[in-house]
Image (cartoon, rainbow, N blue to C red):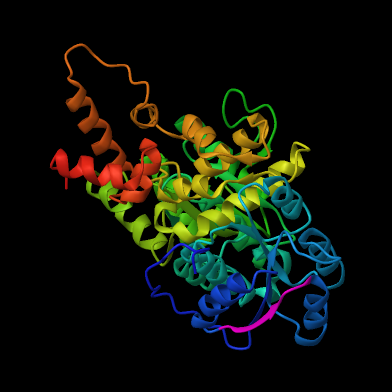
Amino acid sequence: MGAYRQQKKSSIKLSAQDKKILIVDDDPQILIGLKKVVAKQGFETETAASGELALKIIEEASPFMVLLDLRLDGSLDGLELLAMIKESRPEIKVVMISGQRDIHGVVEAMKSGALDYLEKPVDFTRLIDILQSSLSLDANPFAACGDVLDDFILTDDKMRKIAEIIQRLALKSDITVLVLGESGTGKNFLCRKIHELSPRKDFPYVQIGCSNIPEMLFESELFGHEKGSFTDAKAAKKGLIEMAQGGTVLLDEIGEMPYPFQAKILSLLEEKRFRRVGSLRDIHADVKLLAATNRNLHQLVQDKKFRLDLFYRLNVATIELPPLRERINDIPLLVNIFLKNFGEKYQCPGKIVAPAAMEMLKSYSWPGNIRQLKNLIEKMVVLSDEQVISIEELSSNLLTQQQVEAEKMNQPEMPADLSLEAMEEKYIRTAMKLSGGNQRKAADLLKISRDTLRYRLKKLQIR
C-alpha cells in the first residue's frame, strides 16, 4: 500500500445505502486500496481497470460517483471517459485522480465537469470529506424548491437545519423573521431566499439599510410624505414600505435604527398600518417584514439603545447564521462555486485551488466570513496567471502582516535587538497559532518538514 498516505481511522459515518461508487484505475494496487477505504464508509463498490469496462459497468450499475484515474491504459483515457460520462449520464459525479505532474489534465477535467480531484498518493481523509460532501448534496431534501436553494450550501448540519426552518417560515406570509450573524455570514442572501420561497415572491423585495438613512429622513424614507408636509416636500412621495406592498421588506442592520423611530416600527409590526408624513390617513401595510443585524440586541437593550418591546416583538422567529469558521466542510464547496462563477464572469474558466492551498483555506479563521472568501476567490481568479492557485499566491493575498512574516521565514527582516533563536521561536509560535496547533499545517506554513518542526518544538520547549 505504498501508493497511499497512512491515515488514522476516520470516525465519519456516512448514510450510503443504495449508493454505488465505481473506481476506475489500471493499477491493481490502487484499486484494492481505494475499494477498501470506500467500502468502509458504507458504499457499495465496483472496480474497472479500463475505460471500456467502466462504460459497461456504468450502463448496467448506474453508480452514484466515479473515482477516475486521469491516465488509463487502453483506447480510452480518463479525460475521454469523463467526456462520455458527462454527455450520457451528467448526473453522475466524477472525481479525478491524478499524479502531481498531471495538473494540465486536471484543469481540463474540471472544465469538463469533474466535481473535484485527488492527487496521488491519495489522502484518504480528503477522499472521505469529498464522499461526505457529495452524499449530503445528493440527499438534499429541498429539491422541490427548484433553483431557489441550488446555491444554498447544505453540507453543514447547521445549515441544513436552517434551510428547513426558512422553508417553514417563508410559507407563513405574515410572520416576522429576525436573522442574526456576524458580518459576511450571508444574512441578506438568506433573507432574499425567504422571499423567493414565499407566496410573495412575485411582488417587490425591498432592502432598507437602517444605518444608511439620516435620522431626520428616516420616517419620510420609510413611510413617505404628503406634498407640503415639510419645506422640501414639493410633491407627495411613496415610502419604501408602500413601494413594497404585497412583497417583502428587509430592515437590514436594524440594530442601527434610530431609537426614536423604533416605536413606529413596533406599531407597524403590531397594527400593520402606517401614515405618510403630513397625512391623517392610515395605509394598510401588506408586507412581510424581515430584520437582520450583526449587533448583540440584548446588549443594545441593556445600553438603552434598543427598545425592549421591539426586541420581544422581533424575537419570535429567529435564525442565527454560524460563522464560516464553524462550517469548515462547506469551504471547498463555496470555493468551487465562486471559482466557477467568477471564471465565467471574467472569461477564464477552469481555475482550481491546489490541495495544500485548500487546506490553508480550511484552517483560516475568516473574520470576514463568506464575503471575505468570495472577495478573495474573485481576486485570485482575476489576478492569478496560473490555472492552479497555489498556497504561495493565497498566502500573499490572504494572510495578515504577521502571517506574511511567518510565510517569509526564509528571508526574515531581523531587528537588531532579536537573536536568531528568538526570531525562530516567534515564527514557530505564530505558525502553530495560525494552524490551530496542527503540526503538519504549521510545517507547511514554515516550509520545513514535520520532523524538523517537531525537533524545534522540543528544542524550544514549545507545547
Residue lying at the far left of the rendered structure: 461
How many numbered tags mark residues here?
0
Q: Is residue 141 left or right of residue 110?
A: left
Of residues 414 and 312, the one nearer the viewer is: 414
- List x then y, in percent, for residue 33: 54, 74
- List x then y, in percent, for residue 153: 57, 61
- Image height of 119 relative to 42, above or below: above
> Predominant secondary structure in magenta?
strand
**Residue, x 46% and y 70% (percent of image)?**
157
**Residue, x 77% and y 76% (percent of image)?**
54
Does residue 404 appear in the picture of this structure? yes
Does residue 178 appear in the picture of this structure? no
In which image quadrant can residue 167 be found? Answer: bottom right
- List x then y, in percent, for residue 451: 30, 47
- Asked whether residue 46 is drawn in magenta, I would say yes
Of residues 400 and 148, the one nearer the viewer is: 400
- Asked whether residue 329 is drawn in magenta, I would say no
Q: Is residue 345 left or right of residue 388?
A: right
- Image height of 307 relative to 75, above or below: above
Range drawn in magenta: 43-50
Of residues 177 and 308, the one nearer the viewer is: 177
In which image quadrant can residue 89 be found? Answer: bottom right
Residue lying at the far top of the rendered structure: 416
Of residues 99 and 463, the one nearer the viewer is: 99
- List x then y, in percent, for residue 26: 70, 69
Q: Is residue 411 left or right of residue 421?
A: right
